[in-house]
Image (cartoon, rainbow, N blue to C red):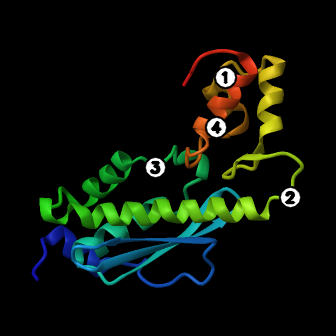
Amino acid sequence: MIYPDNINTILELGKRQGALPTASAQGADAKLDCGCFVRIHLALDEDRITESAYESNGCGYMLAAAEVISDSVVGTRLVDLHGLSDLSLEQVVEEKLGLFPADRKACAEACAGALRSAFTALRAKRVNEFEGETALVCTCFGVTDSTIEDLIESGMALSVDEISAKTNAGSGCGSCRLVIQDIFDAQSGRGAML
């Protein structure tokens, strides 16, 4: 298949394809209608992504999207990811590669899904490694429920955003924001303040 120039350029310059032996986490997704998969590997040093790579048996669109998404997160601090919404990942791909044809959008979606899956695996790994006395709420930054409760009780945090600003909890992958909101609501007796 002949690909557009922007896809070919990324494929020719690609530097992230292959396994990453030093990976802290990996995640995979698949495009079932064509039988293709993509796996994204992430290596982290404390709170920063130091390396990323991908493996795939997909078409050029999938490979190019995986290259762009993998490359876009290297050097990024977890706190700067802000939950990695589908829209933000689509924008990263579109900025580098332009709009994909309708029948190829699922290729980029699978790559975004693989990245989110890698972060899910990272969170699970951190939960398993955690050895604290209280419940771990934010696995990206190791913030416990007692830390959040103490902030609320002291009056130092009057919203979930303020909790995030003071502890980073909820500002990485974003998956714990609803739990933080629940703790906030229970401790403060207030309604949702997201």
Q: Which residue is under mark 4? A: 179
Q: CA distance from mark 3 to mark 4?
A: 18 Å
Residue 160 seen: yes
Mark 3 surroundings within 10 Å by alpha-carbon count, few (fewer than 14), some (14 through 19), many (20 or more): some
Q: Position of residue 114 (x, y in %)?
A: 43, 66
Mark 1 surroundings within 10 Å by alpha-carbon count, few (fewer than 14), some (14 through 19), many (20 or more): some
Q: Earlier in the sequence, mark 2 or mark 4?
A: 2
Q: Nearer the observer, disc 3 or disc 4? A: 4
Examine the image and state in which quarter residue 111 appears: bottom left
Q: Position of residue 26 (x, y in %)?
A: 54, 72
Q: Nearer the viewer, residue 132 or 44?
A: 132
Q: Which residue is under mark 2? A: 131
Q: Nearer the observer, disc 2 or disc 3? A: 2
Q: Earlier in the sequence, mark 1 or mark 2?
A: 2
Q: Nearer the viewer, residue 10 or 157?
A: 157
Mark 4 surroundings within 10 Å by alpha-carbon count, few (fewer than 14), some (14 through 19), many (20 or more): some
Q: Which residue is under mark 1? A: 185
Q: In the current view of this chain or complex, which residue is farthest to the left?
A: 2
| Apparent side of residue 13 relative to residue 163 in the rendered image (left or right) | left
Q: Name which residue lies at 82% across and 20% down.
A: 153
Q: Tell me which amino acid carries mark 3.
A: Leu
Q: Which residue is under mark 3? A: 84
Q: CA distance from mark 1 to mark 2?
A: 26 Å
Q: Secondary structure at mark 3?
A: loop
Residue 64 versus residue 186 in the image, above or below: below
Q: Tell me which amino acid carries mark 4.
A: Val
Q: CA distance from mark 1 to mark 4?
A: 10 Å
Examine the image and state in which quarter residue 11 appears: bottom left
Q: Earlier in the sequence, mark 2 or mark 3?
A: 3
